[in-house]
Every structure is written in C-alpha cells, then in structure tokens.
Image (cartoon, rainbow, N blue to C red):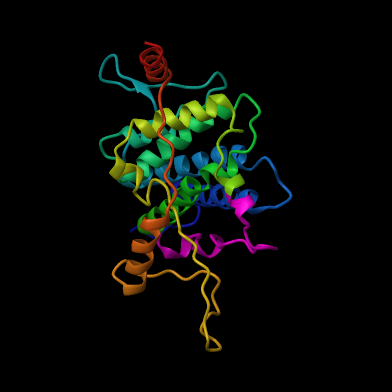
Amino acid sequence: MTKLRKGTKKYELVMKSREAALAAVQIFNNPNITFKSESFSVLIIISWTYLLHAYYENKGIEYRYYKKPNKRKIFDRTKHGAYKHWELERCLDNDKSPIDYESALNLKFLIGLRHEIEHQMTSRIDDSLSARYQACCLNYNHYICKFFGKEHGIEKHLSFSLQFSSISEEQKNLLSEFEELPENIKSYITKFDESISDEEYGSPKYAYRILFVPKTVNKRGQADKVIEFLKHDDPLAAKVNTEYQLIKETEKVKYLPKKIVSIRMMKGS
C-alpha cells in the first residue's frame, strides 16, 4: 500500500478515479435518472482506467503507447499532441496487472457492454445487470484501499436504497424477464456468459447476487437492520442456502442460433 502525496500525478489520478466511481454509483442510485446503465458503464470504466494508471505510475511501469524502431522510444500521440495511454483492457491484459482473474472478467464484461450501448439507445437493462455492477463496485473499493489506503475507499457510499413498497410476485417476475432487452444486448450477455465456466459465473467478484428472505422476530431491537449478512459457516446461512436450493427457479437453457436450427431440423424429421 502506498500513501499518496498531494500534487503528484498518481494522487491526481486516484482522486479523479474515485470521483468517477462515486459519480457512477450516485447516478445509478438516483431515482430520477433513467439513463443509469449507460452512464454507470462509461464512468466506472474511466474510474478503473485511472486507478490502474495510478498503480502503474506508482510502480514505475510505462503505460503509454510507444514504438521503438531503434533504441529510443517514440510515444504515440493524439492529433492534438497528448500521449496515448493504455485503455482499461490493455491495463488488464498486461502481465503485471494486479487485478485478480474474476474481477478482470467482470470488467471485460462491462467493457463489451459499453461497446454495445455507447452508440445506440438501450432500455430496461438496469435490473438485469445490477449484480455485475454491484460486484464491480465492491471490487473497485477493495483495490483502491489495497493500493492507496482505506481513507480513499468508497464503501460508505455503497449503501442499499430504501424501497417504498415490498416486492410483489408480479414485480419479481417483471424484474427477472429478459424479453424486453434489446436483441444486441441479449446476444452479447448470452455469448459472454456461455464463454465462461460455471465457477467463474458464480464468483461474487463477477456478479454479486444476494438472496433476500423476509425475517420475523419476537424481541425488540433484534431486527434493526433491513439487510443482514451472514458468514458462510453460519448455521442459519447453511439452512437458508439448503432450503433455497429446494425452491429456486430454474433458469431456461440458452441456445445459440445454430443450435436452435439444428433442434428444429431434428424435430421436423
């Protein structure tokens, strides 16, 4: 962990990174904004890019693009003369990247999603992808604290929003539907998820999913928290997980177009 000194380049990078992450979270949590996923994806990718630039700056690792036809480095520049720095995916692919595999997988999913949505309007993808956004935020907070100290963490801003009503069965079904997702987004999500293993898909660093169970208590002061987190070895957690396995809904099998055509041909014969 490195302590930051004001006025240095890495300090400015970390401050900008943190500001972009907070802006992403605040926009996504704002009930008056409907352009949530699009804004979050762009801002959180900028945030992670600056964070890794700060890390490489601190380690003395060159993160600018350059050519070296002879012994001298010739740095690539924009048409206005600025240095061309590594984009996030290049930062993650570097062999000195400090980001663990599942966290990097989460970010590569968001990078691909950003490519799909940045040039065209989308709708109704916020609820479908919130688990991956939550994982991204938690991963970010872990690494900014690990690299530059807990004082730069954003955990106090990663709170749960209050609800005006409980979630009804009808609302639950609405939240779980993918039918109204744009076709390009559905296709991207399906192909990405099919390309990774079950273990990777189930990692909380890739997508942070929580099971909510209504809790009733008999004693005052026993249920002051709306959400309670249990350790994995807690007897109650084991009981909840076991019972949930018995009643959980089964996700429909996803098929690629080629497989669907093959199945239809078999049925037709």
**Considering depth in this image, is 199 or 213 the residue closer to the camera?**
213
Position above or below: 230 against 41: below
Q: Residue furthest front?
A: 269
Instruction: State which region is magenta.
Output: 148-172
Position above or below: 102 against 4: above
**Considering depth in this image, is 73 or 217 the residue closer to the camera?**
217
- Where residue 138 appears, as percent x and y from the top left, is 44, 55
- Where residue 192 appears, as percent x and y from the top left, is 40, 31
Q: Residue furthest bottom?
A: 219
Name the residue rendered at 44%, 53% in the picture. Answer: 209
| Residue 152 seen in this snapshot | yes
Instruction: Work out which quarter of the rendered image holds the N terminus and state it.
Output: bottom left
Magenta region includes residue 215: no
| Residue 83 seen in this snapshot | no
- Where residue 110 appears, as percent x and y from the top left, is 47, 37
Name the residue rendered at 30%, 18% in the picture. Answer: 68
